[in-house]
Amino acid sequence: MQRPDFPRIQILQRQTGGFGTGQAYLRFRDEFPKNQTPVVALGLITENINRAVNVFRPYYYPETLLRLTKPRFMLRDGKLKLKENPVRSITELRRLMDDRFLRAIGSDDWWFNRDDYPIFGFPYITILTNKRIWSEAFFGKVVQPISDINPRPWEELWKKEEPRSLMFALFERFFEDARGLGAMPLLLILPQREEVLDRVRVGRLPDHLQTILAHCKAKTLDCIEFVSIFATHMEAEGPQTLDRLYLRAHISPYGNRLIAERILSWLREHGLDVEAQHSDH
């Protein structure tokens, strides 16, 4: 059987551990001129805002095995400025053993020295009243276990002006560049398990998702969020559906099929009609 001629679409998302939105944009800038497609999509999980402001992975997640650096964008006077990866070659990896070097790159890392734990000593009441210690204990034991894909579930950077503005600037630059290159840009907000549960429990999208969607609407950025789609299936089919949608922390083949069907619908809505051909097998 002849394969259907689907419109090609590049989906730029994290390809390695610790991959961030800024790196996805850089990948688009490098690869798209060599491999142009009618549609290019930026994949996002909302935790990625934490990575966008990170330079050295252990500053964000101290227990990580990925003890490497990455480039990041910063906002200066409303404009994006790229801070190159401070380690540019294999021979420079030895610099990661230099405490002075790590402290120097920490100046560009949101998470550097942000924990502000109290000193263990008198008066001990400072330990009992420290908000961060109790937040970490509550989230880590009750709400969301700390993991490599969500090291700081108690932090909500979408409520903070600096990282939120940075992410919005990255979205807008991606859309501007894609349109300038003749492609249709699309933002895909991929659903995290806890966001789907929140949507089912509360009956509305979490605040940070509403913030992103409101910005996209105001700036005319095409966006698809999949939390509502997953939540609708869970409500219709029962709580057990969540285990069909996810394989541990990752989206399952069933969940990916729902995502693909929604993207196909978007393509058709925008005049990129696809005549799907089906096998009898």
Image (spheres, rainbow, N blue to C red):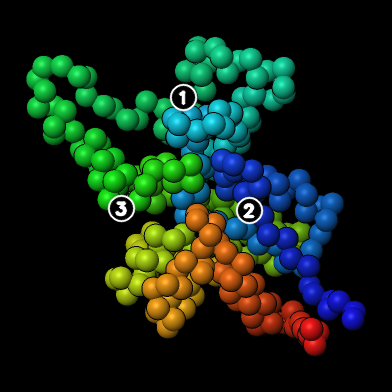
How packed mark 1 is, by other alpha carbons closer than 10 Å (few <14, some 14-19, many 20 or more), is few
Residue 32 vertical position relative to residue 263 in the rendered view, above or below = above
- Neighbor class of circle 2 (other Cα within 10 Å; few <14, some 14-19, many 20+) is many
| Image-based side of 63 in relation to 276, left or right | left
Identify the residue at horizontal 62%, vertical 58% (top origin).
Answer: 42
Residue located at (50% from left, 12% from top):
100
**Res. 107 in view:** yes
Give above or below for 152 relative to 179.
above
Say which label, 1 or 2, has the lower sequence index. 2
* Outermost residue, right side: 2
Q: Secondary structure at mark 2?
A: loop
Q: Nearer the viewer, mark 3 or mark 2?
A: 3
The circle drawn on residue 13 is 2
The location of residue 158, given as percent across then percent down, is 39, 51
Residue under label 3:
143
Look at discs 1 and 2 and give the one toward the viewer. Answer: 2
Q: Is residue 97 above or below residue 267?
A: above
- Distance of label 1 from label 2 (alpha carbons): 27 Å
**Image coordinates for residue 68, horizontal then vertical, percent:** 59, 28
Q: Look at mark 1 in the image and give the residue it sits on.
A: 107
Which of label 3 and label 1 is nearer to you? 3
Ranked by sequence position, the earlier of labels 3 and 2 is: 2
